[in-house]
Amino acid sequence: MTKIRVRLGQAEAEVESDPEHIREAIDLVPELASKLPGANGKAPDGAGPLHAERAVSYEGGGSSVPSVHLDKGDSLADVIGKFFAEPWGRERRKLSDVRDALQSYGLNYPKQSVAVALLRLAKTARLRRFKAEDGEFVYTSGGVMAVPPRPGDEEAWTSLAEPS
């Protein structure tokens, strides 16, 4: 199921649809927005006019897709950074997980482009990168490690922390 959420000030409406009917659901968004409190161009609290912003928000089932707000000008690195800033990014994620998340937002990037963006984010310490037991690189958020290492991974984390 795909959910589209429209929010104006404190008011919020949500449309849920199967992926094959997403176009029809998107067509409902302007109608929903016009019926929300504050749709007259004023915020519900009278704080001033609302500014339209082109953005994408997706909520999929469970932890397979992060729930983030994407702006029109976001770069690939920005989008990946937003993914890893969410609870989704605190778990170990492979390149294929990141590509799947991007594709769920309709962002189709070549595997190599995503791999390079992940590597650059890891080099700037925004992400942590290490080899899992199967030899494939995995990524987690660059902040305090929220998921403790699995048995046998202590060496991988230690080697990242110690300068060579």
Image: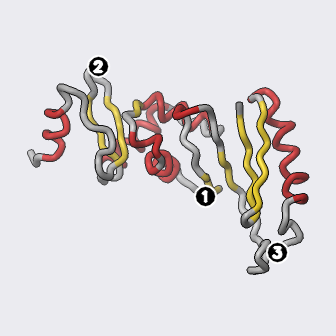
Using a 10 Å C-alpha cutoff, classify the residue at mark 1 as few (fewer than 14 neighbours), some (14 to 19) or many (20 or more).
few
Label 2 is placed on what type of residue? Answer: Asp
Front position in the image: 45 or 157: 45
Whether 7 is drawn above or below 21: the answer is below
Label annotation for residue 73: 1
Q: Residue at x 36, y 49 (%)?
A: 121
Amino acid on which disc 1 is placed: Gly
Seen in the image, is 1 located left or right of residue 87? Answer: right
Q: Circle 3 sits in a helix, a strand or a loop, which is it?
A: loop
x then y, percent, for residue 126: 35, 52
| Other residues around mark 3 within 10 Å, as few (<14) / some (14–19) / many (≥20) | some
Q: Which mark is residue 134?
A: 2
Report the side of 104 relative to 37 (left or right).
left
Return the x and y of residue 67 as percentages of the image width and height.
Answer: 58, 45
State the CA–CA distance, disc 2 to disc 3: 54 Å
Query: Which quadrant holds residue 136?
Result: top left
8 versus 60 height, above or below: below
Q: Residue at x 48, y 48 (%)?
A: 86
Query: Mark 2 or mark 3, which has the lower sequence index?
Result: 3
From the viewer's side, name the closer residue of 90 and 122: 90
